[in-house]
Amino acid sequence: MDKHRPDPKSHFESGGGAYADHRPSYPARLISDLVALTRAQDLCVDVGCGTGQLSVPMADHFANVVACDVSESQIAHASPHGKVAYHIAPAHRIPAKNATADLILAAQAAHWFDLNTFYPEVRRIAAPGAILALISYGVLYIDGPVSERFNAFYWDDLSPHWPAERRHVETKYAELPFPFEELHLEPVSIVRHWKLADFLGYLDTWSAVQAAKRKEAAAIVEAFYNDATQLWGDPEKQQRIEWPINTRIGRL
């Protein structure tokens, strides 16, 4: 890793349980579209796998899945699956053999990587014609009266607390270098209908929220949570939430 880059595990080292409980899973269409691009389905490698949100569904399509994350907490809370082998490992030391991976994923993770060391690892493990997919889901849209207050919380209140790498999510990964033959998928989104507790639980997994609390700026988080509770009304009421998915897809 570049010695000047922050260690990504510092943002997620203690949050594996909350991440497993509150981060959304990926839509079936994204998964099927990625599988359709692959020439074989022997091995999928999920780098920066978190708690396995994408590793586990990929196991329904591949003979084996290798999933790795630099965070011990994430791996400790990962969803078990008989075909998924979890490892604590950084993106520049992927635990896979040379020329074996048919699909290499980095879901909501590539903006944390040192791409100068990650991409050579991708080339090392890639089988001929393998697919590399960098996936992120963007800033959420929420229906109802919480929307305006949420936008102010995200773009204004939390702005000083987001790590610099977050800008790549906001710019849909368009600014990331991507030296591969590029392919494109049809647009797809994650859509959920969440109660208030689900929504606030998800926000608590954000690195900026955790950073604000550590930097004695917890009042801005508490103020938003109080406002959201008032605007939501019945906490059991479900609100529609959508995250647009952005991808950079390449064939090696």
Image (spheres, grey):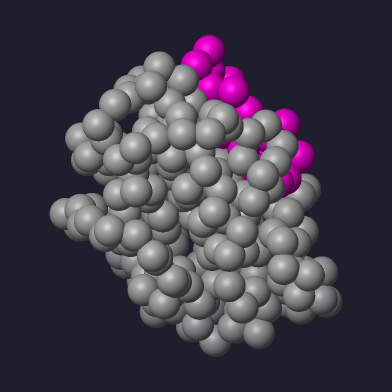
Query: Which of the pair 98/201 is nearer the observer?
Result: 98
Residue at the image point whose x is 34% and y is 37% from the top: 128
Specify whether 152 is left or right of 250. Answer: right
Res 162 quadrant in image? bottom right
Q: Provide residue 168's location: percent of width, then percent of height.
A: 47, 73
Q: Provide residue 44's location: percent of width, then percent of height.
A: 43, 31
Which residues are the magenta region?
Answer: 67-86
Q: Is residue 227 visible?
A: no
Q: Provide residue 4's location: percent of width, then percent of height.
A: 76, 75
Q: Is residue 108 visible?
A: yes
Res 176 quadrant in image? bottom left
Q: Total label count?
A: 0
Specify whether 101 is left or right of 41. Answer: right
Residue at the image point whose x is 55% and y is 72% from the top: 166
Q: Provide residue 36's location: percent of width, then percent of height.
A: 20, 35
Specify whether 8 is left or right of 247. Answer: right
Residue 119 vs 236, above or below: the answer is below
Res 27 quadrant in image? top left
As for residue 165 lying within the magenta part, the answer is no
Residue at the image point whose x is 40% and y is 17% from the top: 63
As for residue 81 lying within the magenta part, the answer is yes
Residue at the image point whose x is 65% and y is 74% from the top: 163
